[in-house]
Image: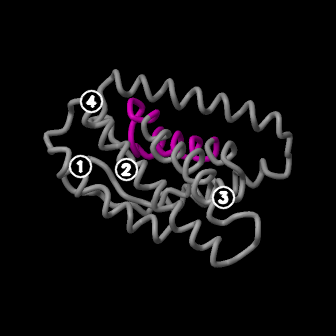
Amino acid sequence: MHMADALVSPLVGAAFWAVSGTLIGYSAKKIAEENDPVKTPLMGVLGAFVFAAHMVNFSIPGTGSSGHIGGGLLLSILLGPYRAFIALASVLIIQCLFFADGGLLALGCNMFNLAFFPAFIAYPFIYRIISGNTVSPGRIATGSIIAAVAGLLMGSLSVIIQTVLSGITELPFGTFLIFMLPIHAAIGVVE
């Protein structure tokens, strides 16, 4: 669900740069407090996997956005939310700078949409509650599916809201919803 620069006004782009930058700083602080050197190399390996998964994407007609597996929930489950946010932010920065996926103006929005919702909303408030403390394959699968779908739907709804707030799109809000939400619900089930 990378947003292109063309979908974001400078004001909205700057606001989400500030939000995402603050989240990166806070996450880095929490990681330093955890002091778990085992997970740091794992961040790189899993980040590379998510980077590769992001390369398989497809354009969503009429929206200026694309659909692909997010990977945020997987990273959150394996690394924790703070490391997941940093790993995804790193992936998005590389994609922006070297592959023109998104753009510099939209980078803060893309970090927020693809990393914030899975790491800080879907993982703690959906996955962890449903999967619980007991190891049950059924609960883990149910929690994973519901949290992945919810995280991607929240991110895609955020794309719509950011674009509408930017005053860029000529699509009516309802039409934008119809284009974005069903495809991201399907991607969430696959994820």
Q: Position of residue 166 (x, y in %)?
A: 27, 29
Q: Amino acid at mark 3?
A: Arg
Foreground disc of the pair 1, 2: 2
The residue located at (56%, 28%) in the rendering is 21
Q: Which mark is residue 8?
A: none
Q: Contact, CB < 8 Å: mark 1 with mark 4?
A: no
Q: Determine the secondary structure under disc 1.
A: loop
Mark before the other along the chain sequence, 2 or 4: 2
Q: Which residue is mark 1?
A: 63
Q: Contact, CB < 8 Å: mark 3 with mark 2?
A: no
Image vertical order of residue 171 relative to residue 153, above or below: above
Mark before the other along the chain sequence, 3 or 2: 3
Q: Position of residue 173 (x, y in %)?
A: 20, 44
Judging depth in this view, the residue of 54 and 21 nearest the camera is 21
Q: Which residue is mark 4?
A: 166
- C-alpha separation, residue under disc 1 versus residue under disc 2: 11 Å
